[in-house]
Image (cartoon, helix red, strand yellow):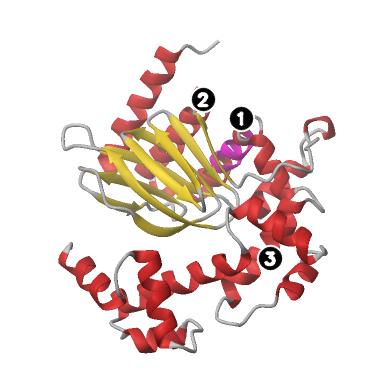
């Protein structure tokens, strides 16, 4: 049995490894593209982003994540699994120059997960149909920490990255499936499950958020009645389909204005808004300021 002292020691060791790649505040994508490191030297304001299918481990500090009306407090020594792309609001609660916030994130591939599940014994795959959580926080276990450490250490051997990375990633998936997060990951790839159906609709929305949506059409995609579809969609994502589409539109508009210097009126049209005033109202409601002031504030913060 692994003691909490041993687990804490392993977490500290992994934090030391990650610090080599993230010495300053920032987000660092590694030579393994799906592997990234995240560091902050002080608490931050709330930020809006999309969490993708992946597993993250908080090694130091504390983070708050808001999804819909649900608030999650995430502490060092905990792992966070996201099974469906989710618009979230988050901020770092605890960080300092002496003890920075540190986290490591590995994005997961749904085909790889499906293949691992297909090879698992049938008796391990029973999953209740009423499990809908798409973001979960659990205490990280020592074997998962060890697997992450091995994956990160491969970065020191660049010629080995294409050979060893798939093997260690498969191990990480196996360990997630057999750990406290496992039931939620299995539900994602269970044929005919509500989570799998909602995942397919979410994937469609990500690529078609500019288009007007009809609830009946989305429900048909999920092979559900409109009322059942709305219920399952909210249970999985924490919001309605229209709210989900709105967040995708507004976050993309913010990206266009900040990174490509697109003005607010043009950004509104590019993400599917017919009314610039409606865009401005909904933007201010989500981000707390008008588009122009929000982008000015972001640039001043650089």
Image quadrant where one finds the N terminus: top right
Residue 198: x and y in percent read 70, 59
- Foreground residue, 121 or 197? 197
Measured in 3D between alpha carbons, the distance from the residue under mark 1 to the one under mark 2, in whole angstroms, is 9 Å
| Residue marked by disc 2 | 141
Report which residue position mark 1 lands on: 180
CA distance for labels 3 and 2 = 32 Å
Q: Secondary structure at mark 3?
A: helix
Q: Earlier in the sequence, mark 1 or mark 2?
A: 2
Query: How crowded is the residue under tag 2: few (<14 C-alpha within 10 Å), some, or many (20+)?
Result: many
Q: Is residue 20 visible?
A: yes
Name the front one of labels 3 and 2: 3
**Start and end of the magenta stretch?**
168-174
* Labels 3, 1: front one: 3
- Membership of 245 in magenta stretch: no
Q: Quadrant of residue 223?
A: bottom right
User: What residue do we see at 34% from left, 57% from top?
Assistant: 47
Secondary structure beneath dot 1 equals loop
Query: Is label 1 in contact with label 2 (beta carbons under 8 Å)?
Result: yes
Crowd around label 3: few <14 · some 14–19 · many ≥20 (10 Å): some
Q: Which residue appears at 26% of the width and 70% of the height? A: 294
Q: Position of residue 222 (x, y in %)?
A: 77, 64
Q: Is residue 90 above or below residue 220?
A: above
Q: Is residue 215 left or right of residue 21?
A: right
Q: Where does label 3 land, which residue?
A: 201
Front position among marks 1 and 2: 1
């Amino acid at each position: 049995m692994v003691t909490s002292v041993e687990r804490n020691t392993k977490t500290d060791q992994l934090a030391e490894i990650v610090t080599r790649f993230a010495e300053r505040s920032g987000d660092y994508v590694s030579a393994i593209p799906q592997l990234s490191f995240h560091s902050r030297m002080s608490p931050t304001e709330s930020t809006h982003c999309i969490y993708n299918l992946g597993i993250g481990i908080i090694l130091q500090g504390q983070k708050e994540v808001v999804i819909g009306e649900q608030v999650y407090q995430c502490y060092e020594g905990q792992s966070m699994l996201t099974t469906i792309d989710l618009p979230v609001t988050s901020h770092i609660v605890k960080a300092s120059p002496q003890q920075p916030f540190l986290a490591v994130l590995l994005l997961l591939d749904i085909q790889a997960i499906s293949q691992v599940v297909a090879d698992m014994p049938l008796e391990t795959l029973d999953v209740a149909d009423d499990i809908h959580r798409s973001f979960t926080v659990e205490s990280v276990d020592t074997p998962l920490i060890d697997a992450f450490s091995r994956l990160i250490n491969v970065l020191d051997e660049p010629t080995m990255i294409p050979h060893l990375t798939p093997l260690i990633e498969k191990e990480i998936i196996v360990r997630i499936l057999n750990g406290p997060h496992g039931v939620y990951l299995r539900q994602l790839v269970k044929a005919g499950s509500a989570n799998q159906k909602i995942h397919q609709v979410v994937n469609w929305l990500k690529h078609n958020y500019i288009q007007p949506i009809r609830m009946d059409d989305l429900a048909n995609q999920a092979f559900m009645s409109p009322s059942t579809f709305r219920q399952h969609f909210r249970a999985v994502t924490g919001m309605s389909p229209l709210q989900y589409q709105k967040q995708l539109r507004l976050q993309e508009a913010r990206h266009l204005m900040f990174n490509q210097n697109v003005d607010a009126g043009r950004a509104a049209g590019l993400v599917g808004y017919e009314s610039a005033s409606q865009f401005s109202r909904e933007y201010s409601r989500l981000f707390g300021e008008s588009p122009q002031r929000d982008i000015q504030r972001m640039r001043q913060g650089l």
